[in-house]
Image (cartoon, rainbow, N blue to C red):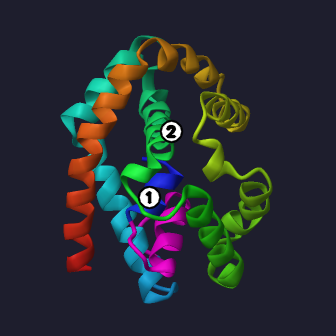
């Protein structure tokens, strides 16, 4: 899952959302210098990734992309799944996506000093370009994939995967819908044990 899903799956705890959001940039077990709720978000993020990567439905989605995108297939499906979450947001929350997004952006501002330096550098772009809202459209997904291509050290053609998104749109959406229901249940159970 990508940024939007990780934030959503953190419940109502702002610091847990922040930990979950920036966890990809925190390696190993050396994160005990963060507030305890951020630590919980980091642990939750890793649990979500482990569950997702091993899930047969997620693997089915990545298999469709693997011939053209190889090891980037999982990253692409993470982005696609965030698109379907954003597109169908009202099925998952009573709060509008715009309000949810703005509350999260404000939380990043409020807890700026708790962010990793890498996250601090990213936040202005995240907010200015409104990445979380851009997941709602295929055009927004294409822009996100182009930016990811530009950041990759090797040649990446992830931006081209929008063609597969359009071609297999209903299949990806159905897979997301079934998978995400299970992921919500799994994440909620994990939060109770943190």
Q: Earlier in the sequence, mark 1 or mark 2?
A: 1
- For the C terminus, the image quarter is bottom left
Residue in view at x 37 percent, y 30 percent:
173
Residue in view at x 70 percent, y 32 percent:
143
Q: Are marks 1 and 2 in contact (CB under 8 Å)?
A: no
Magenta stretch: residue 15 in it?
yes
38 w.r.t. 6: above or below: below
Residue in view at x 66 percent, y 35 percent:
140
Q: Residues within 10 Å of mark 1 (few under 14, many from 20)?
A: many
Residue corresponding to mark 2: 83
Q: Which residues are magenta?
A: 10-30
| Occupied quadrant, residue 73 | top left
Regarding residue 41, the answer to whether it shows in the image is yes
Image location of residue 120, percent across then percent down: 72, 69
Q: Nearer the viewer, residue 110 or 74?
A: 110
Q: Nearer the viewer, mark 1 or mark 2?
A: 2
- Image-based side of 157 in relation to 125, left or right: left
Which element is circle 2 on?
helix
- Image-based side of 65 in relation to 140, left or right: left
Which element is circle 1 on?
helix
Q: Which mark is residue 6?
A: 1
103 w.r.t. 52: above or below: below
């Amino acid at each position: 899952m990508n940024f939007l899903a990780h934030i959503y799956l953190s419940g109502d705890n702002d610091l847990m959302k922040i930990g979950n959001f920036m966890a990809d940039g925190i390696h190993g077990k050396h994160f005990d210098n963060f507030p305890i709720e951020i630590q919980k978000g980091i642990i939750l993020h890793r649990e979500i990734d482990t569950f997702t990567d091993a899930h047969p439905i997620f693997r089915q989605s990545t298999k469709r992309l693997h011939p053209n995108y190889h090891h980037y297939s999982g990253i692409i499906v993470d982005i696609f799944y965030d698109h379907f979450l954003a597109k169908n947001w009202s099925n998952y929350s009573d709060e509008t996506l715009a309000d949810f997004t703005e509350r999260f952006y404000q939380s990043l501002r409020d807890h700026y000093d708790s962010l990793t330096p890498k996250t601090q550098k990213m936040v202005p772009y995240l907010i200015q370009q409104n990445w979380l809202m851009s997941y709602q459209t295929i055009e927004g997904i294409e822009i996100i994939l182009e930016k990811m291509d530009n950041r990759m050290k090797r040649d990446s053609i992830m931006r081209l995967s929008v063609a597969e998104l359009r071609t297999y749109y209903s299949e990806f959406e159905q897979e997301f819908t079934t998978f995400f229901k299970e992921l919500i249940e799994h994440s909620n159970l994990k939060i109770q044990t943190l």
